[in-house]
Amino acid sequence: MRELCELLQCQANNLMSRTNQLVLVRHGESEFNLKNLFCGWHDAPLSAGGLEEARSLAAANLNEANMVFDKVYCSRLCRSRTTVEAILSEMQCSFLPIVSDWRLNERHYGNLTGVNKRVLANQYGEEQVQFWRRNYDGLPPPINESNIYYYQIANNPAFLDVPPNEFPLTESMRMCVDRVAPIWLEIKKEVLMGTRILLVVHGTVARALIKHIEGFSEEQIEKVNIPNSVPIVYEFNIKSGELVGDVKYLGDSQYIEKMKKKVAAIGD
């Protein structure tokens, strides 16, 4: 009861302050990130390093910035949820409500799922691989039964509530942007009501949300790269719904720029 009263008081204070913050975080490094494999809707866990990133980068920087949250959103994939649990544990707020929504799942990489990016580049060329990765309408080949992860994805109980006509076999960036649009409107409505939200998602989904939040063009969002476990802080005018001030990336700026370049590259 005490926690609820404190939560309601904080939300009231947010409304009186006329601004509210939203924090966006890409999950910690996954086992597939570590191996440089396309992951998408495959439920790859965090690597040991990814779990440490969630604690020593995401949570540590959020604590240092004195961030406080009322609610958390994540996807149905365990790398997102595990990152949330690690962050909340380090911030000593594991009691917060967590909403896990399939619409925040990573972009589906179709039949590229499980394939090493460098091996693929050696076979098809870097330009083609970067087209699949970065072009706004780049559409990988649909996943089929020959892919060893096909049945794991299709039969994942975490996806039972995905409408059959919306269960993707592949997605472009454009399709991902369209998929997250409705849930972003739901989240933004809560933010403008004073709820302080932490969003822990995936690389391309983070970019899709950033397109909606910052109003980037298709060409601009193709060039955005999101490092693992780096919190991005947005502040909104509660009355107008517009962004206030500059977007803030929490953490060491040199490290962040280094990791952005790593994300952009095809890798080894």
Image (tube, helix red, strand yellow):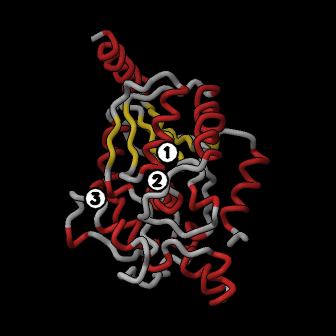
Task: Name the quarter where the C terminus is drawn.
Answer: bottom right
- Image x and y of residue 225, in percent: 62, 61
Mark 3 belongs to which amino acid? Phe
Q: On the rendered structure, is 127 left or right of 95?
A: right
* Res. 192 image quadrant: top left
Q: Is residue 115 above or below residue 70?
A: below
The CA span between labels 1 and 3 is 33 Å
Residue projecting furthest to the right: 254
Q: Is residue 31 above or below residue 122?
A: above
Kindly indicate whether the residue at mark 1 contacts the one at mark 2 (C-beta within 8 angstroms): yes
- From this view, report whether residue 256 is shown above or below residue 264: above
Read off the residue under disc 3: 159
The residue indicated by pointer 2 is 213
Residue at (79% x, 47% y) in the render: 254
Instruction: Name the residue beneath numbered marker 1.
Output: 243
Say which element carries label 3: helix
The image position of residue 231, as x and y in percent, is 58, 42
Tell me if residue 218 comes above or below residue 82 in the rendering.
below
Callout 1 secondary element: loop
Marks 2 and 3, how far apart at CA: 26 Å
- Please state, as top left, top right, bottom left or bottom right, where the N terminus lies in the image: top left
Q: Secondary structure at mark 2?
A: helix
- Tell me the kind of residue under disc 1: Leu
Gap in angstroms between the C-alphas marked 2 and 1 = 8 Å
Q: Is residue 183 left or right of residue 149?
A: left
Marks 1 and 3: CB-CB under 8 Å? no
Mark found first going from the N terminus, 2 or 1:
2
Q: Residue at x 36, y 52 (%)?
A: 76
Q: Nearer the viewer, residue 61 or 238?
A: 61
- Residue 246 visible in the picture: no
Contact check, label 2 and label 3, Cβ < 8 Å: no
How packed mark 1 is, by other alpha carbons closer than 10 Å (few <14, some 14-19, many 20 or more), is: some
